[in-house]
Image: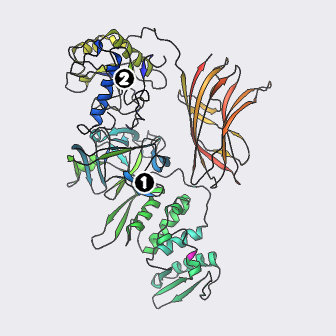
Amino acid sequence: MPRPSKYVSRADLGWGPSPAGRADPKSGLVVHYDSVDQDLANRGHSACVAYWNSTRRFHTGPSRGWADIGYCVDEETQILTEDGWRPFDAIAPGDLVLALDHTTGLSGWQPLLAVNVFPAAPRELLLMDGHGHSSLTTPGHRWPVERRTGRPGRDPRPGSGFAPAWTTSEELTVRDRIRTAAPCADLPVQAKWPDALVELVAWAWSVPGPGTVIRRPLRRGTEDAARVRGVLHGLFGAAAADSPDAVTWWEEHTSTEAVFRLSAGADGALAEQMPARVPSHTFLRSLTRAQLDLFMRVTMTAAGKDDRFLDRPDEAGAEAFRFAAVLAGRTASVRVVPLGGWRVELSPEQTFSPRAVAARTEGFAFEFIRHEGPVWCPTTPYGTWLARRAGTAYFTGNSFMACAHGHVLEGRGLYRVQAAQPGGNSSHYSVTLATGPGDPVTPAQVEAVRQLRQWLMEPDTSISGKVLGHRDFIATSCPGEKAYRMVRDGTFTRPPSGSEGDDMPRHRRFEKDDAQELAPGTWTSLKFDRRHDGRTGELYSLVGVDEPDGALYDLSVGVTIADLAPGTEVQLRASEYESDGDGGWRPARNRPNDSPLHGRGNGHFTYSWKSNLAAGRRVRIRLVQYGGAPARITSATAEVFFWPR
């Protein structure tokens, strides 16, 4: 069944995208009411729209402080961008931030879609704070967690006995583990820098101060000195005396150590990688996984430390080392050392269970506190982000109204955490009738709820057909006696009348999981691996396979491409194919293309097109890049709306 005929979207209401955390409710629909008579049935539909806008303003205003009708963090919490940690007032939509793909367990750089800030007001926030973790969030703040399943050995993901799940701060249990680290899927595969340069940076930056002087104690034997000597020889040639313009190095010995010095020219060659004597975020992002491990291992060796912690005299250096650890998938925290400096502590664990630690550890806070300042939350495509608070880092990340005139007004919308029924905000959608105890529940409202329920049961969302009342979750009068009788007698679970038209489009979503090579100068059809309805395989055609008589279509696609050189031109276009008469397909019509230029890092490109697909044809997305070497399409998503003939 298409979307309800009298559907009012967030865009229709003038609202932006909902910042509420992502969820996939499957267990049914929960009915609510207002508890105060509204008399909307005796007024025009514009009164219902005004009521819904007023409801949103109340819940997101100072008196409640919810995020779009309940999840935010305090202003001390920062987010990791490609250039380091940033507070909420130093980021903007389009910035690349590190986010967790909760389906794969890998992290990646994602564009920031929105920064949602709510003004200072008295609020009750949940503080989780102690060794290993610090967060201050609204009760409904969402978390991607690993949840103990009680079935060790049957979960195919790493960490047997745990499965990915979503929960909120107030609903965390001892079975839930917050992700504190995840290997980055966007690391380059081919090395940009020689390993010798990576190792030299690791040796050099470990010695604070101007100029590069590397000292290796001789009491440790000659192995370290031989490694440094080999690196310098490989990069700059044989040792030579210093001169004003020479790019060279030389070696001195004392009774206790070998001392390696770089000329001003050689030292200047390292300035790009380590300005201000600290490795840059750009340099660290350009390293392969093996080079990140090499950088961290040599840095620890140069500092004379094991693989558990690193002490630095400067905060910038400590955070640079943590940045490398984060990209490598290591849990790292930074704290001030009482006698001066900063310590980076590494942990072999990739998760942390606040509830479990609070239950067994004295001094770990898990309590509600009063907070007077602003709260904020970002919006990302994955619905997650890497947060930092008090030196610790971790991944963290009402729906509808049926009015008296039969309209369904969108609240948080599809695939969003609700904020209406504690214990069911991630598992159920919610709908309010906007009525009070004395207001009638009109036939048009009943029909609107039936249409909404039927629509949510379609393959895209696939909820259970079960309808509950708010009082089925907690002790409350909601949704009122009239509506609850209808919940109990099955009024809302009957089929819609079918009186609405069928002018709404159908929808498909395609996802790409496996990398695909993109050779330079060659148009390549974008291959998807799965569809929203469970279909898998080599999926090229977005429309036409199941629409032999043609269709009107409106498509959009987002593509991530790795290994592109800066300045490379990339072109995307929709192409319509027809049968070649020999069992294959050939291009019949190329639609206009888009030609963006790649800046830096992984390329993130989007394309959209709408047209009329003739009978017997199919439409694909094709790409070409004009760099000097092959690139890789690492991920892609396509959304298609279509009207078959």
Amino acid type, residue under disc 2 in the picture? Gly
Is 274 placed left or right of 176 in the picture? right
Q: Is residue 618 magenta?
A: no
Residue holding disc 2: 28
Q: Position of residue 135 (x, y in %)?
A: 30, 50
Q: Quadrant of residue 313?
A: bottom left
Quick one: quadrant of the C terminus?
top right
Residue 544, visible in the rendered structure: no
Task: Spot the residue most to the bottom.
Answer: 255
- Dot 1, crowdedness within 10 Å: few (<14), some or many (≥20)? many
Where does the image place residue 337, in percent across and percent down from the top left? 30, 69
Q: How far apart are labels 2 and 1 at the CA level?
A: 36 Å
For marks 2 and 1, the one nearer the N-term is 2
Q: Residue furthest right?
A: 582
Is any atom of residue 582 visible in this view?
yes
* Residue under the image location 36 percent in, 23 percent down: 28
Above or below, comparing residue 468 to residue 517 in the picture: above
User: Percent x, y for residue 57?
Assistant: 30, 33
- Mark 2 or mark 1: which is in front? 1
| Magenta portion: prevailing SS class | loop
Residue range in magenta is 268-273
**Amino acid type of the residue tagged 1 in the rendering:** Leu
In-image side of 424 versus 571 (left or right): left
How far from the left and from the top, in percent, is residue 3?
Answer: 46, 20
SS at mark 2 in the image: loop
**274 and 293: which one is in front?**
274
Contact? badges 2 and 1 (CB < 8 Å):
no
Label 1 residue SS: strand
According to the picture, the residue beneath numbered tag 1 turns out to be 80
